[in-house]
Image (cartoon, rainbow, N blue to C red):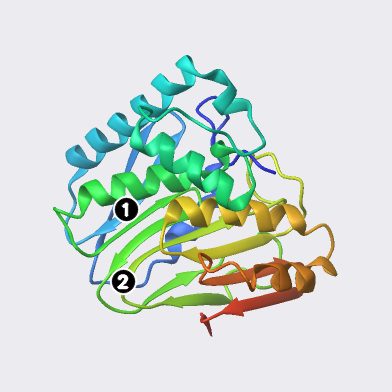
């Protein structure tokens, strides 16, 4: 299992986030908001830093407040139950932990991206919120999302075509970033209708990849998981793909 982002962990070094410079779509503008360890890269029809900053602060405070009341939530590497009056974002992380069989903090980056994204849809119905490789996307047309897989030769070479709709596209890695991982995947990319679920499931699948030989069995494992819409698994020169996904060259 993996704790993708906690509010006490050092942020991913900025040189690793060079993928933020790959943007080619000229129909949206880019801006960033940062609070503590949270560093969101947002693509929208126009910049609106103050509402984005306010939303990020609100959801961080909800998470931080709950962690003080229930410290076991932050430390658990297993699915974790919360009370019914827990904040909605916390209940979403808990539900994702049971879905994927991981600790609830494995979904925190995707949860922040999704909840901030939903807050901002009233300002821009076309929107991408990226949080350390975990993405909430609402789009009316096909978008290409590049795949970053560390030192794998596939980095900067492939992109996912994401159809119109609202999606979560999240990546877990055992070789990139500061997160605790029990796998060795350069990238485990998962597409769901929710960024919270995609983050949790990316964690689970990334943990299953110890060697390139594990890619095939991991793809077999996801075939009966209806909440997962697509998967890309990369370790070195080996890649596995499952689902209704279209990979294109960049």
Q: Is residue 84 left or right of residue 209?
A: left
Q: Name the element at disc 1.
A: strand
Question: x, y (%) of residue 26?
Answer: 26, 71
Mark 2 or mark 1, earlier in chain: 1
Contact (Cβ within 8 Å) of mark 2 with mark 1: no
Residue 120 in view here: yes
Number of residues whose C-alpha sits closer than 10 Å to that of mark 1, classed few (under 14), some (14–19) or many (20 or more): many
Residue 148 in view here: no
Question: x, y (%) of residue 139?
Answer: 28, 70
Q: Is residue 70 above or below residue 148?
A: above
Residue ranking furthest to the top: 69
Position of the N terminus, as image quadrant, is: top right
Instruction: Give the image quarter of residue 234.
Output: bottom right
The residue carrying mark 1 is: 42
The residue carrying mark 2 is: 165
Q: Is residue 126 above or below residue 109?
A: below
Q: Name the element at disc 2.
A: strand
Q: Which mark is residue 246?
A: none
Residue ranking furthest to the front: 84
Residue in view at x 44 percent, y 55 percent: 195
Question: x, y (%) of residue 148?
Answer: 58, 63
Marks 2, 1: nearer the viewer: 2
Residue in view at x 63 percent, y 45 percent: 177
Q: CA distance from mark 2 to mark 1?
A: 17 Å
Residue in view at x 44 percent, y 57 percent: 20
């Amino acid at each position: 299992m993996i704790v993708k982002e906690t509010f006490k962990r050092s942020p991913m070094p900025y040189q690793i986030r060079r993928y933020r410079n790959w943007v080619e779509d000229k129909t949206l503008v880019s801006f960033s908001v940062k609070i503590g360890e949270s560093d969101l890269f947002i693509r929208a029809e126009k910049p609106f830093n103050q509402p984005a900053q306010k939303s990020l602060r609100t959801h961080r405070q909800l998470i931080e407040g709950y962690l003080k009341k229930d410290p076991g939530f932050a430390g658990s590497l297993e699915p974790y139950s919360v009370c019914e009056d827990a904040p909605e974002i916390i209940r979403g992380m808990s539900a994702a932990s049971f879905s994927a069989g991981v600790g609830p903090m494995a979904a925190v980056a995707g949860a922040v991206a999704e909840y901030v994204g939903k807050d901002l849809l009233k300002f821009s119905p076309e929107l991408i919120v990226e949080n350390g490789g975990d993405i909430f996307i609402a789009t009316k047309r096909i978008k290409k999302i590049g795949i970053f897989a560390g030192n794998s030769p596939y980095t900067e070479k492939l992109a996912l075509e994401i159809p119109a709709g609202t999606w979560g596209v999240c990546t877990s890695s055992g070789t990139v970033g500061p997160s605790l991982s029990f796998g060795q995947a350069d990238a485990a990319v998962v597409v769901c209708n929710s960024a919270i679920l995609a983050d949790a499931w990316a964690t689970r699948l990334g943990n299953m990849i110890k060697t390139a030989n594990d890619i095939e069995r991991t793809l077999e494992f996801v075939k009966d998981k209806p909440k997962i819409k697509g998967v890309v698994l990369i370790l070195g020169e080996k890649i596995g793909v499952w689902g209704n996904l279209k990979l294109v060259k960049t």
